[in-house]
Protein backbone atom coordinates (compact mmCIF):
# COMPACT_ATOMS: atom_id res chain seq x y z
CA UNK A 1 0.00 0.00 0.00
CA UNK A 2 1.37 3.41 -0.98
CA UNK A 3 0.54 6.74 0.60
CA UNK A 4 -2.06 8.80 -1.27
CA UNK A 5 -0.92 12.36 -1.95
CA UNK A 6 -3.27 13.89 0.65
CA UNK A 7 -1.89 11.62 3.37
CA UNK A 8 1.60 12.77 2.45
CA UNK A 9 0.64 16.41 2.89
CA UNK A 10 -1.08 15.72 6.21
CA UNK A 11 1.92 13.72 7.34
CA UNK A 12 4.41 16.50 6.60
CA UNK A 13 2.32 19.23 8.16
CA UNK A 14 1.73 17.09 11.25
CA UNK A 15 5.36 16.28 12.00
CA UNK A 16 6.88 19.68 11.25
CA UNK A 17 5.47 22.46 13.41
CA UNK A 18 6.41 25.73 11.77
CA UNK A 19 5.12 29.28 11.61
CA UNK A 20 4.99 29.37 7.84
CA UNK A 21 3.30 26.77 5.64
CA UNK A 22 5.99 25.23 3.44
CA UNK A 23 5.71 24.63 -0.22
CA UNK A 24 5.42 20.90 -0.84
CA UNK A 25 6.44 19.51 -4.18
CA UNK A 26 6.08 16.09 -5.72
CA UNK A 27 8.82 15.00 -8.11
CA UNK A 28 9.43 11.82 -10.02
CA UNK A 29 12.81 10.16 -9.49
CA UNK A 30 14.11 7.22 -11.46
CA UNK A 31 15.16 5.43 -8.26
CA UNK A 32 12.06 6.17 -6.17
CA UNK A 33 8.40 5.24 -6.38
CA UNK A 34 7.52 8.49 -4.66
CA UNK A 35 9.97 11.23 -3.71
CA UNK A 36 8.57 13.90 -1.46
CA UNK A 37 10.69 16.72 -0.18
CA UNK A 38 10.00 19.65 2.07
CA UNK A 39 12.28 22.58 1.36
CA UNK A 40 12.25 25.32 3.99
CA UNK A 41 14.58 27.88 2.48
CA UNK A 42 14.84 31.67 2.58
CA UNK A 43 13.16 31.79 5.96
CA UNK A 44 13.51 34.95 8.03
CA UNK A 45 12.61 33.20 11.29
CA UNK A 46 14.71 30.79 13.28
CA UNK A 47 13.27 27.30 13.29
CA UNK A 48 14.92 24.69 15.45
CA UNK A 49 13.69 21.12 15.55
CA UNK A 50 15.65 18.53 17.51
CA UNK A 51 16.37 15.40 15.48
CA UNK A 52 15.24 13.07 18.25
CA UNK A 53 11.98 14.97 18.65
CA UNK A 54 11.41 14.85 14.92
CA UNK A 55 12.01 11.11 14.79
CA UNK A 56 9.53 10.55 17.61
CA UNK A 57 6.97 12.61 15.75
CA UNK A 58 7.60 10.51 12.64
CA UNK A 59 7.04 7.33 14.60
CA UNK A 60 3.84 8.54 16.25
CA UNK A 61 2.39 9.90 13.02
CA UNK A 62 3.29 6.73 11.11
CA UNK A 63 1.45 4.71 13.74
CA UNK A 64 -1.56 7.03 13.43
CA UNK A 65 -1.59 6.54 9.66
CA UNK A 66 -1.28 2.79 10.07
CA UNK A 67 2.12 2.52 8.40
CA UNK A 68 3.65 -0.03 10.73
CA UNK A 69 6.85 -0.60 8.71
CA UNK A 70 8.06 2.95 9.26
CA UNK A 71 7.01 2.94 12.91
CA UNK A 72 8.69 -0.37 13.70
CA UNK A 73 11.97 -0.06 11.84
CA UNK A 74 12.58 3.70 12.07
CA UNK A 75 13.89 3.80 8.52
CA UNK A 76 12.08 7.04 7.96
CA UNK A 77 14.63 9.78 8.64
CA UNK A 78 14.05 13.45 9.29
CA UNK A 79 17.32 15.29 9.55
CA UNK A 80 17.59 18.94 10.48
CA UNK A 81 20.48 21.22 9.73
CA UNK A 82 20.85 24.89 10.65
CA UNK A 83 23.61 27.17 9.46
CA UNK A 84 24.33 30.87 8.92
CA UNK A 85 24.30 32.04 5.32
CA UNK A 86 24.27 35.67 4.20
CA UNK A 87 21.02 37.31 5.31
CA UNK A 88 19.41 34.08 6.52
CA UNK A 89 19.42 33.58 10.28
CA UNK A 90 19.13 29.85 9.70
CA UNK A 91 17.61 27.25 7.40
CA UNK A 92 16.35 23.76 8.09
CA UNK A 93 16.09 21.05 5.50
CA UNK A 94 14.18 17.80 5.79
CA UNK A 95 14.60 14.79 3.54
CA UNK A 96 11.42 12.73 3.66
CA UNK A 97 10.81 9.78 1.38
CA UNK A 98 7.99 7.32 0.92
CA UNK A 99 8.09 3.84 -0.54
CA UNK A 100 6.15 0.82 -1.58
CA UNK A 101 6.36 -2.12 0.84
CA UNK A 102 9.39 -3.86 -0.66
CA UNK A 103 11.66 -0.92 -1.41
CA UNK A 104 12.89 1.49 1.22
CA UNK A 105 15.18 4.38 0.37
CA UNK A 106 17.04 6.51 2.87
CA UNK A 107 18.32 9.90 1.83
CA UNK A 108 21.02 11.94 3.50
CA UNK A 109 21.00 15.72 3.20
CA UNK A 110 24.17 17.78 3.20
CA UNK A 111 24.89 21.40 2.56
CA UNK A 112 27.59 22.50 0.14
CA UNK A 113 28.43 26.18 -0.04
CA UNK A 114 25.12 26.96 1.60
CA UNK A 115 22.93 25.07 -0.84
CA UNK A 116 21.34 21.66 -0.38
CA UNK A 117 22.07 18.60 -2.42
CA UNK A 118 20.85 15.05 -2.01
CA UNK A 119 22.87 11.90 -1.55
CA UNK A 120 21.34 8.44 -1.56
CA UNK A 121 23.07 6.34 1.07
CA UNK A 122 21.46 2.97 0.52
CA UNK A 123 18.31 1.50 -0.90
CA UNK A 124 16.10 -1.55 -0.90
CA UNK A 125 16.99 -2.51 2.66
CA UNK A 126 14.95 -3.20 5.76
CA UNK A 127 16.70 -4.15 9.04
CA UNK A 128 16.52 -7.86 9.77
CA UNK A 129 18.51 -8.12 13.00
CA UNK A 130 18.28 -4.84 14.94
CA UNK A 131 14.58 -4.15 14.52
CA UNK A 132 14.01 -2.38 17.80
CA UNK A 133 13.43 -3.78 21.25
CA UNK A 134 12.22 -7.35 20.71
CA UNK A 135 13.64 -8.60 24.00
CA UNK A 136 10.40 -10.07 25.33
CA UNK A 137 9.31 -13.36 23.81
CA UNK A 138 5.70 -12.20 23.32
CA UNK A 139 6.90 -9.18 21.36
CA UNK A 140 9.26 -11.36 19.34
CA UNK A 141 6.53 -13.88 18.54
CA UNK A 142 4.25 -11.00 17.55
CA UNK A 143 6.80 -10.05 14.89
CA UNK A 144 6.89 -13.57 13.48
CA UNK A 145 9.51 -14.87 15.88
CA UNK A 146 10.14 -18.64 16.07
CA UNK A 147 8.07 -19.11 12.92
CA UNK A 148 11.19 -20.08 10.99
CA UNK A 149 12.02 -22.67 13.65
CA UNK A 150 8.55 -24.16 13.17
CA UNK A 151 9.02 -24.17 9.40
CA UNK A 152 12.44 -25.79 9.68
CA UNK A 153 11.06 -28.59 11.86
CA UNK A 154 9.09 -29.67 8.79
CA UNK A 155 12.17 -29.73 6.55
CA UNK A 156 14.93 -32.24 6.16
CA UNK A 157 18.07 -31.15 8.06
CA UNK A 158 20.26 -31.44 4.95
CA UNK A 159 17.94 -29.00 3.14
CA UNK A 160 18.60 -26.37 5.84
CA UNK A 161 22.37 -26.83 5.55
CA UNK A 162 22.13 -26.52 1.78
CA UNK A 163 20.07 -23.32 2.10
CA UNK A 164 22.68 -21.75 4.36
CA UNK A 165 25.39 -22.79 1.88
CA UNK A 166 23.58 -21.25 -1.07
CA UNK A 167 22.92 -18.01 0.83
CA UNK A 168 26.65 -17.23 0.84
CA UNK A 169 26.65 -16.33 4.54
CA UNK A 170 30.16 -15.78 5.87
CA UNK A 171 31.11 -15.82 9.51
CA UNK A 172 30.77 -12.46 11.24
CA UNK A 173 33.32 -13.16 13.97
CA UNK A 174 36.44 -12.10 12.09
CA UNK A 175 37.63 -14.94 9.86
CA UNK A 176 34.78 -14.69 7.32
CA UNK A 177 34.66 -18.43 6.63
CA UNK A 178 31.54 -19.64 4.72
CA UNK A 179 29.06 -20.81 7.37
CA UNK A 180 27.31 -23.50 5.36
CA UNK A 181 30.65 -25.00 4.37
CA UNK A 182 31.73 -25.12 8.02
CA UNK A 183 28.48 -26.86 8.94
CA UNK A 184 29.08 -29.51 6.29
CA UNK A 185 32.42 -30.42 7.91
CA UNK A 186 30.85 -31.76 11.10
CA UNK A 187 31.52 -35.45 11.69
CA UNK A 188 28.68 -37.85 10.98
CA UNK A 189 26.76 -39.11 14.02
CA UNK A 190 28.57 -42.02 15.65
CA UNK A 191 26.74 -42.27 18.95
CA UNK A 192 28.59 -39.26 20.38
CA UNK A 193 26.95 -36.02 21.51
CA UNK A 194 27.35 -33.09 19.11
CA UNK A 195 27.56 -29.48 20.25
CA UNK A 196 27.19 -25.88 19.12
CA UNK A 197 29.34 -23.21 20.75
CA UNK A 198 28.08 -19.67 20.13
CA UNK A 199 30.99 -17.26 20.43
CA UNK A 200 29.87 -14.10 22.24
CA UNK A 201 33.27 -13.28 23.72
CA UNK A 202 33.73 -10.03 21.80
CA UNK A 203 36.83 -8.59 23.44
CA UNK A 204 38.54 -7.02 20.44
CA UNK A 205 39.10 -3.27 20.78
CA UNK A 206 36.68 -1.51 18.47
CA UNK A 207 34.17 -4.40 18.42
CA UNK A 208 30.87 -4.01 20.27
CA UNK A 209 28.15 -5.31 17.95
CA UNK A 210 27.10 -8.60 19.56
CA UNK A 211 25.88 -6.96 22.73
CA UNK A 212 23.31 -5.08 20.64
CA UNK A 213 21.82 -8.44 19.67
CA UNK A 214 21.89 -9.59 23.32
CA UNK A 215 20.05 -6.42 24.29
CA UNK A 216 17.61 -5.86 21.44
CA UNK A 217 16.92 -9.24 19.89
CA UNK A 218 18.21 -12.19 21.96
CA UNK A 219 15.42 -14.48 20.75
CA UNK A 220 16.66 -14.12 17.17
CA UNK A 221 19.99 -15.55 18.36
CA UNK A 222 18.23 -18.34 20.25
CA UNK A 223 16.12 -19.19 17.21
CA UNK A 224 19.26 -19.31 15.08
CA UNK A 225 20.91 -21.65 17.59
CA UNK A 226 17.87 -23.93 17.56
CA UNK A 227 17.70 -24.08 13.76
CA UNK A 228 21.41 -24.91 13.65
CA UNK A 229 20.92 -27.56 16.34
CA UNK A 230 18.08 -29.18 14.39
CA UNK A 231 19.95 -29.03 11.07
CA UNK A 232 23.10 -30.62 12.53
CA UNK A 233 21.54 -32.92 15.12
CA UNK A 234 23.17 -31.20 18.08
CA UNK A 235 22.74 -32.28 21.68
CA UNK A 236 23.29 -28.88 23.29
CA UNK A 237 24.15 -25.26 22.49
CA UNK A 238 26.58 -23.28 24.64
CA UNK A 239 26.26 -19.50 24.38
CA UNK A 240 29.62 -18.18 25.60
CA UNK A 241 29.47 -14.52 26.71
CA UNK A 242 32.42 -12.48 27.93
CA UNK A 243 32.48 -12.06 31.69
CA UNK A 244 32.34 -8.25 31.64
CA UNK A 245 28.94 -8.39 29.93
CA UNK A 246 27.06 -9.04 33.18
CA UNK A 247 24.09 -6.90 32.16
CA UNK A 248 23.76 -8.66 28.81
CA UNK A 249 24.28 -12.11 30.34
CA UNK A 250 21.23 -11.54 32.51
CA UNK A 251 19.21 -10.45 29.46
CA UNK A 252 20.12 -13.59 27.51
CA UNK A 253 19.49 -15.82 30.53
CA UNK A 254 16.01 -14.34 30.83
CA UNK A 255 15.36 -14.88 27.11
CA UNK A 256 16.50 -18.51 27.31
CA UNK A 257 14.23 -19.07 30.33
CA UNK A 258 11.30 -17.67 28.31
CA UNK A 259 12.13 -19.99 25.41
CA UNK A 260 12.18 -22.98 27.77
CA UNK A 261 8.84 -21.90 29.21
CA UNK A 262 7.33 -21.76 25.70
CA UNK A 263 8.73 -25.24 24.93
CA UNK A 264 11.00 -23.99 22.15
CA UNK A 265 13.98 -25.49 24.00
CA UNK A 266 14.27 -28.78 25.84
CA UNK A 267 12.68 -32.15 25.23
CA UNK A 268 10.55 -32.90 22.17
CA UNK A 269 10.59 -29.35 20.78
CA UNK A 270 7.26 -28.44 19.17
CA UNK A 271 6.31 -32.12 19.16
CA UNK A 272 8.96 -32.87 16.56
CA UNK A 273 10.77 -35.50 18.59
CA UNK A 274 13.93 -33.38 18.49
CA UNK A 275 15.48 -32.29 21.78
CA UNK A 276 18.33 -29.92 22.59
CA UNK A 277 19.45 -27.75 25.48
CA UNK A 278 20.83 -24.19 25.67
CA UNK A 279 23.40 -23.32 28.33
CA UNK A 280 24.73 -19.82 29.03
CA UNK A 281 28.45 -19.93 29.85
CA UNK A 282 30.00 -16.83 31.36
CA UNK A 283 33.64 -16.16 30.50
CA UNK A 284 36.17 -14.77 32.93
CA UNK A 285 37.42 -11.80 30.93
CA UNK A 286 40.16 -13.16 28.66
CA UNK A 287 40.59 -12.03 25.05
CA UNK A 288 42.10 -15.40 24.11
CA UNK A 289 38.74 -17.09 24.82
CA UNK A 290 37.47 -15.57 21.59
CA UNK A 291 39.73 -18.00 19.72
CA UNK A 292 37.52 -21.00 19.02
CA UNK A 293 39.66 -23.72 20.58
CA UNK A 294 40.52 -21.48 23.54
CA UNK A 295 36.78 -21.06 23.99
CA UNK A 296 36.37 -24.86 23.98
CA UNK A 297 38.98 -25.28 26.71
CA UNK A 298 37.34 -22.51 28.74
CA UNK A 299 33.92 -24.22 28.59
CA UNK A 300 35.57 -27.47 29.66
CA UNK A 301 36.96 -25.69 32.72
CA UNK A 302 40.56 -25.68 31.55
CA UNK A 303 43.04 -22.87 31.00
CA UNK A 304 41.97 -21.39 27.63
CA UNK A 305 45.08 -22.32 25.67
CA UNK A 306 44.32 -22.56 21.93
CA UNK A 307 44.69 -26.04 20.49
CA UNK A 308 46.78 -27.20 17.57
CA UNK A 309 44.70 -27.87 14.46
CA UNK A 310 44.01 -30.38 13.00
CA UNK A 311 41.94 -31.98 14.37
CA UNK A 312 39.40 -29.21 13.87
CA UNK A 313 36.49 -28.66 16.28
CA UNK A 314 33.99 -29.99 13.73
CA UNK A 315 35.67 -33.37 14.24
CA UNK A 316 37.05 -33.15 17.79
CA UNK A 317 35.66 -30.29 19.85
CA UNK A 318 33.95 -30.05 23.24
CA UNK A 319 34.86 -33.10 25.34
CA UNK A 320 36.25 -34.77 22.24
CA UNK A 321 32.91 -34.56 20.39
CA UNK A 322 32.05 -32.86 17.08
CA UNK A 323 31.43 -29.15 17.69
CA UNK A 324 30.40 -26.24 15.47
CA UNK A 325 31.52 -22.78 16.60
CA UNK A 326 29.74 -19.71 15.21
CA UNK A 327 29.64 -16.05 16.14
CA UNK A 328 26.54 -14.43 17.68
CA UNK A 329 25.82 -12.32 14.60
CA UNK A 330 26.38 -15.30 12.30
CA UNK A 331 23.76 -17.40 14.07
CA UNK A 332 21.36 -14.45 14.18
CA UNK A 333 21.41 -14.45 10.38
CA UNK A 334 20.12 -18.03 10.15
CA UNK A 335 16.39 -17.22 10.73
CA UNK A 336 16.75 -14.33 8.28
CA UNK A 337 18.06 -16.71 5.60
CA UNK A 338 15.24 -19.18 6.21
CA UNK A 339 12.67 -16.38 6.02
CA UNK A 340 13.96 -14.71 2.86
CA UNK A 341 15.32 -17.78 1.11
CA UNK A 342 18.90 -18.32 -0.01
CA UNK A 343 18.55 -16.48 -3.32
CA UNK A 344 16.99 -13.32 -1.86
CA UNK A 345 19.49 -13.26 1.01
CA UNK A 346 22.44 -13.60 -1.37
CA UNK A 347 21.31 -10.44 -3.19
CA UNK A 348 21.64 -8.27 -0.07
CA UNK A 349 24.88 -6.30 -0.18
CA UNK A 350 28.09 -7.40 -1.87
CA UNK A 351 27.96 -10.65 -3.89
CA UNK A 352 31.18 -11.99 -2.36
CA UNK A 353 30.05 -11.27 1.20
CA UNK A 354 26.25 -11.02 1.21
CA UNK A 355 23.70 -10.24 3.89
CA UNK A 356 23.05 -7.71 6.63
CA UNK A 357 26.08 -6.53 8.58
CA UNK A 358 26.36 -4.78 11.92
CA UNK A 359 28.86 -1.95 11.55
CA UNK A 360 30.35 -0.81 14.84
CA UNK A 361 31.68 2.69 14.20
CA UNK A 362 33.80 4.33 16.90
CA UNK A 363 36.52 6.93 17.24
CA UNK A 364 36.40 10.54 16.13
CA UNK A 365 32.94 10.58 14.56
CA UNK A 366 29.89 12.58 15.54
CA UNK A 367 27.55 9.62 15.87
CA UNK A 368 29.41 6.50 17.01
CA UNK A 369 27.31 3.38 17.34
CA UNK A 370 26.19 0.11 15.77
CA UNK A 371 24.40 0.39 12.43
CA UNK A 372 22.78 -2.45 10.52
CA UNK A 373 23.26 -2.03 6.79
CA UNK A 374 24.03 -4.29 3.83
CA UNK A 375 27.59 -5.44 3.29
CA UNK A 376 29.56 -3.56 0.66
CA UNK A 377 28.97 -0.06 2.03
CA UNK A 378 31.66 2.47 1.17
CA UNK A 379 33.84 3.32 4.15
CA UNK A 380 33.56 7.01 3.30
CA UNK A 381 29.74 6.79 3.30
CA UNK A 382 29.78 5.03 6.66
CA UNK A 383 31.95 7.76 8.16
CA UNK A 384 30.41 10.87 6.62
CA UNK A 385 26.77 9.91 6.06
CA UNK A 386 25.95 7.20 8.57
CA UNK A 387 28.17 8.29 11.47
CA UNK A 388 27.70 12.00 10.87
CA UNK A 389 31.22 12.82 9.75
CA UNK A 390 34.41 13.48 11.66
CA UNK A 391 34.19 15.65 14.77
CA UNK A 392 34.81 19.38 14.31
CA UNK A 393 34.97 18.91 10.55
CA UNK A 394 38.47 17.50 10.63
CA UNK A 395 40.04 15.19 8.07
CA UNK A 396 40.30 11.42 8.41
CA UNK A 397 43.88 10.38 9.06
CA UNK A 398 43.36 6.63 9.44
CA UNK A 399 40.73 3.90 9.76
CA UNK A 400 41.00 0.40 11.17
CA UNK A 401 38.11 -1.34 9.36
CA UNK A 402 37.49 -4.51 11.34
CA UNK A 403 38.63 -4.30 14.93
CA UNK A 404 42.10 -3.51 16.22
CA UNK A 405 43.86 -6.56 14.76
CA UNK A 406 43.03 -5.70 11.14
CA UNK A 407 45.60 -3.74 9.07
CA UNK A 408 45.20 0.02 9.34
CA UNK A 409 44.34 2.17 6.29
CA UNK A 410 45.46 5.73 5.62
CA UNK A 411 42.78 8.33 5.05
CA UNK A 412 43.93 8.80 1.46
CA UNK A 413 43.42 5.06 0.78
CA UNK A 414 39.69 5.07 1.50
CA UNK A 415 38.19 6.32 -1.77
CA UNK A 416 36.08 3.60 -3.34
CA UNK A 417 36.89 0.99 -0.69
CA UNK A 418 33.80 -0.95 0.36
CA UNK A 419 33.15 -3.17 3.38
CA UNK A 420 33.36 -6.60 1.80
CA UNK A 421 36.04 -9.23 1.49
CA UNK A 422 37.32 -8.57 -2.04
CA UNK A 423 37.44 -4.78 -1.85
CA UNK A 424 39.22 -4.69 1.51
CA UNK A 425 41.68 -7.36 0.40
CA UNK A 426 42.64 -5.23 -2.60
CA UNK A 427 43.11 -2.26 -0.27
CA UNK A 428 45.47 -4.30 1.90
CA UNK A 429 43.29 -5.07 4.89
CA UNK A 430 40.44 -7.35 6.05
CA UNK A 431 36.83 -6.92 7.15
CA UNK A 432 37.24 -8.66 10.52
CA UNK A 433 34.25 -7.85 12.71
CA UNK A 434 33.33 -4.68 10.76
CA UNK A 435 34.29 -2.55 13.75
CA UNK A 436 35.54 0.68 12.18
CA UNK A 437 37.87 2.80 14.32
CA UNK A 438 38.08 6.29 12.81
CA UNK A 439 40.98 8.60 13.64
CA UNK A 440 41.14 12.29 12.80
CA UNK A 441 44.06 14.39 11.61
CA UNK A 442 45.23 15.19 15.16
CA UNK A 443 45.66 11.56 16.16
CA UNK A 444 49.12 10.32 17.09
CA UNK A 445 49.27 6.92 15.38
CA UNK A 446 52.26 5.83 17.47
CA UNK A 447 50.30 6.52 20.64
CA UNK A 448 47.33 4.52 19.34
CA UNK A 449 49.40 1.48 18.39
CA UNK A 450 51.42 1.80 21.59
CA UNK A 451 48.18 1.44 23.54
CA UNK A 452 47.30 -1.61 21.47
CA UNK A 453 50.72 -3.11 22.18
CA UNK A 454 49.88 -3.05 25.89
CA UNK A 455 46.56 -4.75 25.18
CA UNK A 456 48.09 -7.59 23.17
CA UNK A 457 50.89 -8.13 25.68
CA UNK A 458 48.36 -8.25 28.53
CA UNK A 459 46.02 -10.64 26.68
CA UNK A 460 48.61 -13.07 25.31
CA UNK A 461 47.97 -16.44 26.94
CA UNK A 462 51.73 -17.14 27.02
CA UNK A 463 51.54 -20.59 25.45
CA UNK A 464 53.67 -19.72 22.38
CA UNK A 465 57.10 -18.14 22.84
CA UNK A 466 56.97 -15.80 19.79
CA UNK A 467 53.72 -14.28 21.07
CA UNK A 468 54.58 -14.25 24.77
CA UNK A 469 58.03 -12.71 24.31
CA UNK A 470 57.29 -10.73 21.18
CA UNK A 471 54.29 -8.78 22.51
CA UNK A 472 56.19 -7.90 25.68
CA UNK A 473 59.28 -6.77 23.79
CA UNK A 474 57.18 -4.68 21.42
CA UNK A 475 55.42 -2.92 24.28
CA UNK A 476 58.78 -1.90 25.78
CA UNK A 477 59.88 -0.48 22.43
CA UNK A 478 56.66 1.52 22.09
CA UNK A 479 57.25 2.97 25.55
CA UNK A 480 60.59 4.26 24.21
CA UNK A 481 58.79 5.90 21.29
CA UNK A 482 56.25 7.54 23.56
CA UNK A 483 59.08 8.92 25.73
CA UNK A 484 60.76 10.19 22.54
CA UNK A 485 63.81 8.09 23.36
CA UNK A 486 63.66 5.72 20.39
CA UNK A 487 65.95 5.72 17.38
CA UNK A 488 65.22 4.93 13.76
CA UNK A 489 66.86 1.58 14.35
CA UNK A 490 63.95 0.74 16.70
CA UNK A 491 61.55 1.06 13.77
CA UNK A 492 63.39 -1.65 11.88
CA UNK A 493 63.62 -3.71 15.08
CA UNK A 494 59.82 -3.61 15.40
CA UNK A 495 59.45 -4.88 11.84
CA UNK A 496 61.94 -7.67 12.53
CA UNK A 497 60.01 -8.75 15.65
CA UNK A 498 56.80 -8.77 13.62
CA UNK A 499 58.38 -11.16 11.14
CA UNK A 500 59.30 -13.46 14.01
CA UNK A 501 55.75 -13.39 15.39
CA UNK A 502 53.54 -13.61 12.31
CA UNK A 503 52.56 -17.13 11.29
CA UNK A 504 54.66 -18.80 13.96
CA UNK A 505 52.11 -19.45 16.72
CA UNK A 506 49.17 -21.78 17.37
CA UNK A 507 46.48 -19.10 17.14
CA UNK A 508 46.11 -15.77 15.34
CA UNK A 509 46.64 -13.43 18.31
CA UNK A 510 50.29 -12.89 17.41
CA UNK A 511 49.34 -12.33 13.77
CA UNK A 512 46.78 -9.67 14.68
CA UNK A 513 49.24 -7.93 16.99
CA UNK A 514 51.99 -8.05 14.37
CA UNK A 515 49.64 -6.59 11.73
CA UNK A 516 48.82 -3.65 14.00
CA UNK A 517 52.53 -2.86 14.42
CA UNK A 518 53.74 -3.69 10.90
CA UNK A 519 51.10 -1.92 8.84
CA UNK A 520 51.11 1.20 11.01
CA UNK A 521 54.86 1.47 10.39
CA UNK A 522 54.56 0.80 6.66
CA UNK A 523 51.76 3.34 6.22
CA UNK A 524 52.76 5.97 8.82
CA UNK A 525 56.53 5.62 9.07
CA UNK A 526 56.97 9.39 9.12
CA UNK A 527 55.10 9.55 12.42
CA UNK A 528 57.40 7.00 13.99
CA UNK A 529 60.39 9.01 12.82
CA UNK A 530 59.00 12.12 14.50
CA UNK A 531 59.19 10.26 17.80
CA UNK A 532 62.84 9.35 17.29
CA UNK A 533 65.81 11.15 18.82
CA UNK A 534 67.63 13.64 16.65
CA UNK A 535 64.53 15.06 15.00
CA UNK A 536 64.56 18.82 15.46
CA UNK A 537 60.88 19.74 15.36
CA UNK A 538 59.69 23.26 14.77
CA UNK A 539 57.42 24.70 17.46
CA UNK A 540 53.82 23.65 16.83
CA UNK A 541 54.74 21.05 14.21
CA UNK A 542 53.66 18.18 16.41
CA UNK A 543 51.81 18.14 19.70
CA UNK A 544 52.58 14.96 21.62
CA UNK A 545 49.69 15.65 23.97
CA UNK A 546 47.11 15.19 21.25
CA UNK A 547 44.59 12.49 21.98
CA UNK A 548 44.74 8.93 20.78
CA UNK A 549 41.71 7.64 18.91
CA UNK A 550 38.73 7.40 21.21
CA UNK A 551 37.24 3.95 21.13
CA UNK A 552 40.64 2.24 20.88
Image (spheres, rainbow, N blue to C red):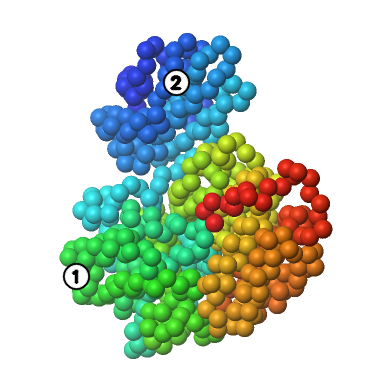
Residue 454, how many percent across, how many down? 58, 67
Nearest to the eye among marks 1 and 2: give it.
Answer: 2
Q: Earlier in the sequence, mark 1 or mark 2?
A: 2
Determine the residue positioned at 27% across, 74% down. Answer: 277
Number of numbered markers = 2
Residue 437, how many percent across, how many down? 56, 53
Left/right of residue 146 with respect to residue 93 in the rendered view: left
CA–CA distance between discs 1 and 2?
55 Å
Determine the residue positioned at 32% across, 33% down. Answer: 56
Give the position of the N terminus as an image quadrant.
Answer: top left
| Camera-side residue of 535 and 243 | 535
Asked whether residue 26 is in view, the answer is no
Q: Secondary structure at mark 1?
A: helix
Reading the image, the residue beneath label 1 is 271
Left/right of residue 487 with respect to residue 248 in the rendered view: right
| Camera-side residue of 38 and 276 | 38
Residue 308, how many percent across, how many down? 54, 85
Left/right of residue 542 with respect to residue 70 in the rendered view: right
Residue 10, how many percent across, how many down? 32, 20
Give the position of the C terminus as an image quadrant.
Answer: bottom right
Label number found at residue 109: none
Q: Secondary structure at mark 2?
A: strand
Asked whether residue 447 is in view, the answer is yes
Reading the image, the residue beneath label 2 is 38
Amino acid sequence: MEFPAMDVVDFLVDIVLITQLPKIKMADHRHLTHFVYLHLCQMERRVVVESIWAMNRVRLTAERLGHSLIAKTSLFLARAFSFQRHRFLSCIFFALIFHHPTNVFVISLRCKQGFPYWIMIYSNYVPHILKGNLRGIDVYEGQGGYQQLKNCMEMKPEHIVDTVKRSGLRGRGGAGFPTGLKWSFIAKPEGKPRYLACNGDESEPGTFKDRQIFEQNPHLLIEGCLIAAYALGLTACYIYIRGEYLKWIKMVEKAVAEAYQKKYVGKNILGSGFSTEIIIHRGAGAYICGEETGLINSIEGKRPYPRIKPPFPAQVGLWGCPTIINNVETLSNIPVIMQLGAEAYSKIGAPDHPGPLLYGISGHVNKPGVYELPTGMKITDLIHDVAGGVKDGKKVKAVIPGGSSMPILRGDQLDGVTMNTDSLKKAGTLIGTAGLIVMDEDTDIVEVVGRLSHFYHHESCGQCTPCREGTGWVELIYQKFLRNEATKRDIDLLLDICRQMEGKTICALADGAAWAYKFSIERFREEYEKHCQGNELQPGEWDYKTKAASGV
